[in-house]
Image: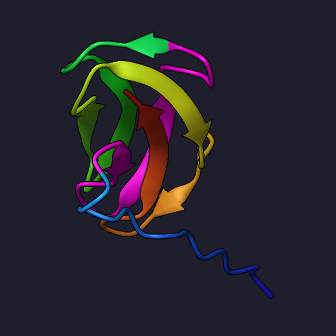
Amino acid sequence: MKEMKFHPKAQKSIKGQVGAPMPGKVLEIKVEVGSKVEKGQPLCVLSAMKMETVVNSPLAGTVKVVHVTADTSLEGDDLILEIEE
């Protein structure tokens, strides 16, 4: 039996939460906890329907928590990581 994993959803009202823009699989995480990021910087790469989508940082800050790893399957709006300004 396949194990089901449920991921928390990104809260749009919380500025530093970065969610998946669409369902897909995480191909690569480009940052780690403690990384300083700039607005627009690539954070991770998702694969959906044979297309790769780069998820960019919505703000400048420091990566506080990374909730996923490479190969994680996500639904739309699943929380990927959190950034602190």
Residue 65 vs 85, above or below: the answer is below
Give left or right: position of 27 versus 55. right
Residue found at x 57% / y 33%: 64
Comparing 65 with 73, the one in front is: 65
In the rendered image, which quarter is residue 38 located in?
A: top left
Q: Is residue 75 left or right of residue 13?
A: right
Picture coordinates of residue 53, whole percent (x, y): 24, 38
- Along the viewing direction, whichever of 60 and 1 lies nearer the viewer: 60
Quarter of image, res 84? top left
Does residue 38 appear in the picture of this structure?
yes
Taking the magenta stretch, the answer to whether it contains residue 24 is: yes
Quadrant housing the N terminus: bottom right
- Which residue is drawn at the image coordinates 68% and 80% (left, top)? 4
Q: Can residue 70 be seen?
A: no
User: Looking at the image, is 70 positioned above or below residue 61?
Assistant: below
Vertical order, 20 against 66 (above or below)? below
Q: Is residue 33 magenta?
A: yes
Specify the farthest residue to the right.
1
Rendered residue at 43%/34% (across/down)? 83
Residue 39 location, x and y as percent? Answer: 21, 19
Is 14 rendered above or below residue 52?
below
Residue at point 29%, 19% (across, down): 60
Which quarter of the figure has residue 54? top left
Judging from the image, the colouring scheme is rainbow
Range drawn in magenta: 15-35
Q: Quadrant of the C terminus?
A: top left
Query: Residue 18, percent across and down?
Result: 35, 46
